[in-house]
Amino acid sequence: MEKVIYVNETDAQRKPLLPSASSSVMSGLRLTAGVPLKDRDDSVLASAAGAPVKHTSRPIVTGSSVIAMRCKDGVVMATDTLASYGSLARFRQISRLYKATDHCVIGGGGDMSDFFELCETVRKETTLEYCYDDGHMITASAIHQMLARIMYNRRNKMDPYWNYMLVAGWQHGKPVLGYVDLVGSHFVSEVIATGYGEYLGLPLLRKAYREDITVEEGKKVLQQILTVLFYRDARTIDRIQIACVTEKGVEISEPTKLETEWSYKAFISGARASDVSTW
Amino acid sequence: MSILQPNASVRGLPNADPRVASSGFKLGEHHDPYDPLDVAHPAAPLSRHFHPYEDNGGTVLSVSGGDYTIVASDTRLGSGYSVPTRYVSRVIKLTDKAVLASSGMHTDIAILHKVLRIRLTQYRHRHRKEMSLEAISQLLSTILYYRRFQPYYTFNVLGGIDENGQGWSYGYDAIGSHEKVRAVCSGSGQYLLQPVLDNQVEFRQMAADPTRKELQLEPCVELVKDAFTSTCERDIYTGDLVEICRITAKGVEMEKFELRAD
């Protein structure tokens, strides 16, 4: 006989939760992420019957900035490899870049488990496309739009995927670079940065950008910006990955260590109010 | 706003614990009881609620003369004190005689424009003609009110030419209330722009002058450019570029005009 779970004693006398909901429950704790859609809808129904619904109300294991630049001959995108648990540098060798297709790469910040789930959703779609075997593959802007719709749908349910993502690709002989976030905001632009990168990196990206900048130059710019971020963003590590999407396809570098320079005067003596610059 | 407060975190990162925060700030200072991002309150739990809404700013306007309407919007996308991108289009050509411009939350604008485009296509297929300006103005109101209790955070102006060839503008609030006027604007620069339009287009607060005539199309475009240039001097959410649509019997023409980008 199936065990029926009750919300509390008063509810126990009144209404058992839906049987289908209880069948997938092993403990009293239910997580929303990873639960099949049907069960998630059940949890909404259960909430109407008085049970609390568990949503992602804050990010737990987080990734910091993602930065990217659209170049003449492709797109470059870079992240560090850290996933923090609050202020703890918990996972130091996580890749926050996902190769979605031969000509599309996704970079994610925010909650990492949400990001990996989204990557799985994208993988399901690209696998389906692969199975059609018709020589076509979903384009980067289609993936960008799909992610925007998923994110917007979840924000409408007040159950967001807590992420900031960049989508880079090469399609119809042109580079594309787009942004999506947890409320569904999305746009395309020549330079984009998320997280602390938006404050510290975006001005540098805009300064470095030219219409005829090449991927090779772009990679160097991103590396410099990640160094700047490493100096000031406390949720960053000095190990980075750079992805590059060109006509030839996606190339994601192995994690490489950033070269840092700590002998600057302000780093040694500390910045004081009387200094001309605190930088 | 909480963005400059002690312990306020960057969106997407967990908050610093106010109890172990370094000295330099007096906790509880500048406390805003209505701000859920304000973690300085000792009784507040150490978590943040999810905010489904965000204001991305932007200013939109629509001005109508006898046989024309001008619809314009700037292209800056603002978020907090940053400008994530300088070019997003907020105007959409609905038919050859109607253009919509929206400010507010960018993601809601995107979906609202999508919904409208779908509804107008369905109408075109069903009735073998374009929807009239008057009908579009009512449709937009209905679509907005449909989401009365989780509104599209958008502030729209609709402009175009009606079935008699007369130019008209419509101003909306987020939940579908609307009015039919000669000149209207909406968004973050509304309070800077609207008095200028009232005075220069509708001749409010002016002495009666029998020789005065209604503005013609080109002088009116110049007025719109000046108005936007002035607005972006004082409103940080307006700037970068203005897209100006002229709607006449000939159709819709779009012009781009640069604003300051700082």
Image: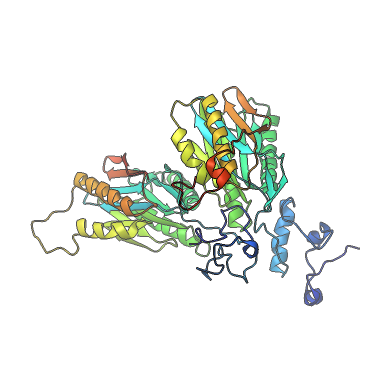
Q: Residue at x 47, y 26 (%)?
A: A213
**B128 sits left or right of B205 in the view:** right
Residue situated furthest top in the rendering: A248
**Quadrant for the N terminus of chain A in the image:** bottom right
Residue A168 to residue B141: above or below? above
The residue nearer to you, when weighing B175 against A178, is A178
**Residue A104 visible, this orientation:** yes
Spot occupied by residue B211 in the image (x, y as percentages of width and height): 8, 56
Quarter-of-image position of residue A43 = bottom right
Provide residue B147's location: percent of width, then percent of height.
51, 61
Question: Looking at this rendering, what residue extends furthest in the left direction?
Answer: B211
Q: Nearer the viewer, residue B121 or B42?
A: B42
| Relative to A11, A242 lies left or right | left
Residue A141, image x and y in percent? 55, 36
Asked if residue B163 shows in the view, the reply is no
Vertical position of residue A240 compared to residue B169: above or below: above
Q: Is residue A278 above or below residue A21?
A: above
Residue appearing at x 53%, y 39% in the figure: A178
Q: What is the total number of numbered labels drawn onto the structure image?
A: 0
- Which residue: 35% across, 50% down? B132
**Above or below A195: residue B16:** below
